[in-house]
Amino acid sequence: MPKLIEFIARLFFPSDGRYRAEAVPAPPVPRPLPTPLLPHAGPLRGEDVAIVRPYLIAFERQREAQRGRERRTALVLATQGIDYDFRAGAA
């Protein structure tokens, strides 16, 4: 009879904790970072950004050099009396 009472007592009452594992605290919940307020109102312009892809700069320089060559060619041909539309060659 005492073993039956001990068995029922163990079922309904918690143990004293001598053999329990250490309780692991839950990891802290990360708080969301505040979003900074940006002062610009619209999209950024390419001139305003310091980091520009180098191949875009090279392309723009090539186009500008080509336009300059076309204008110089038009001037040389104009001195010889030949009409040359430099805008048609660059397009």
Image: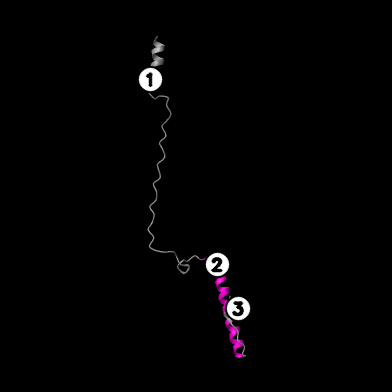
Crowding near the residue tagged with mark 3, few <14, some 14–19, many ≥20 C-alpha atoms within 10 Å? few
Quarter residue 27 falls in: top left
Residue name at image x 47 percent, y 69 percent: 47
Q: Earlier in the sequence, mark 3 or mark 1?
A: 1
Q: Which residue is mark 3?
A: 89
> Does the magenta segment cover residue 58?
yes
Distance in Å between CA atoms under marks 2 and 3: 26 Å
Q: Earlier in the sequence, mark 1 or mark 2?
A: 1
> Does the magenta segment cover residue 37?
no
Q: Amino acid at mark 2?
A: Pro
Relative to residue 33, is residue 81 depicted above or below? Answer: below
Q: Magenta span: helix, strand or loop, mainly?
A: helix
Distance in Å between CA atoms under marks 1 and 2: 75 Å
Residue contact at pointers 3 and 1, CB within 8 angstroms:
no
Q: Which residue is mark 1?
A: 12
Relative to residue 13, is residue 89 depicted above or below? Answer: below
Residue name at image x 39 percent, y 16 percent: 8
Q: Which residue is mark 2?
A: 54
| Residue 33 position within the rendered picture, expressed as x and y whole percent measured from the top left | 39, 51
Q: Furthest-bottom residue in view?
A: 80
Q: Is 79 situated left or right of 10 in this image?
A: right
Residue name at image x 41 percent, y 15 percent: 7
- Depth check: give the residue in front, 21 or 81: 81
Give the magenta range: 52-79
Distance in Å between CA atoms under marks 3 and 1: 95 Å
Q: Amino acid at mark 1?
A: Phe
Q: Amino acid at mark 3?
A: Gly
Front tag of 3 and 1? 3
Q: From the image, which quarter does the C terminus lie in? A: bottom right
Residue contact at pointers 2 and 3, CB within 8 angstroms:
no
